[in-house]
Amino acid sequence: MMKKRKEKRYAQGLTRVASEGDGDFVQKLSCEVFSIYGDYDEIVPRWLSNPDVLTLIYVDDVHPLGFAMLSVPSGEILAIAVMPQYQRTRIGSVLLKRIRDLASQLGLRRLTVHTADENAGAQLFFQKAGFEVIGSRERYYSQGQTALILSKGI
């Protein structure tokens, strides 16, 4: 019973476009949740400074709890991350829906995402949202892991 209330509460949070002040949060969370795949200390600043990358922040009250990044020209979701203590509260789903809505408004017809072959949780998350595996890339991540490529029409 408690879990449902928690999910409902966080599913009603606010998403907003990231501002310059959000860079530290995005950087820290990326390093925390993605570090097994590579050096996000180098990757995230490039994404944040790229004018073709749209970053959304999920906020509950005034505290950021997660983010999503979309490469606008390609329709590639670069990252969706939620603070570990708030995972499985629908925040990721809210961010994904908002990214999908924005991509549609921008005229994109398809979204793609790469996720590690060994990351069963992320694969399930995207497949539940209607994404299908369309391929893979060996040694895609700097730590050597294979990535699955998932895609979904908008």
Image: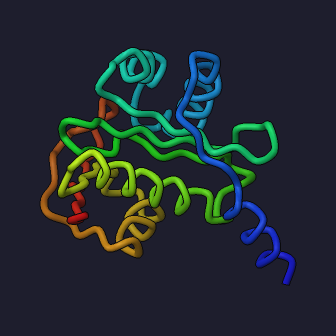
Figure quadrant of residue 132: bottom left
Against 10, is 139 above or below? above
The image shows residue 122 at horizontal and vertical percentages of: 44, 60
Figure quadrant of residue 88: bottom right
Locate the N terminus and report the quarter of the image it occupies: bottom right
In the foreground, 47 or 41 = 47
Against 15, is 109 above or below? below
In the foreground, 114 or 62 = 62
Against 135, is 99 above or below? above
- Kindly identify the residue that appears in the image at 41 percent across and 75 percent down: 128
The image shows residue 52 at horizontal and vertical percentages of: 29, 26
- Kindly identify the residue that appears in the image at 50 percent across and 33 percent down: 35
> Among all residues in the image, which is located at the extreme right?
2
- Kindly identify the residue that appears in the image at 70 percent across and 38 percent down: 64
Residue 10 is left or right of residue 139, and the answer is: right
Q: What sort of colour scheme is used for the picture?
A: rainbow
The image shows residue 44 at horizontal and vertical percentages of: 44, 23
Residue 126 is left or right of residue 89, and the answer is: left
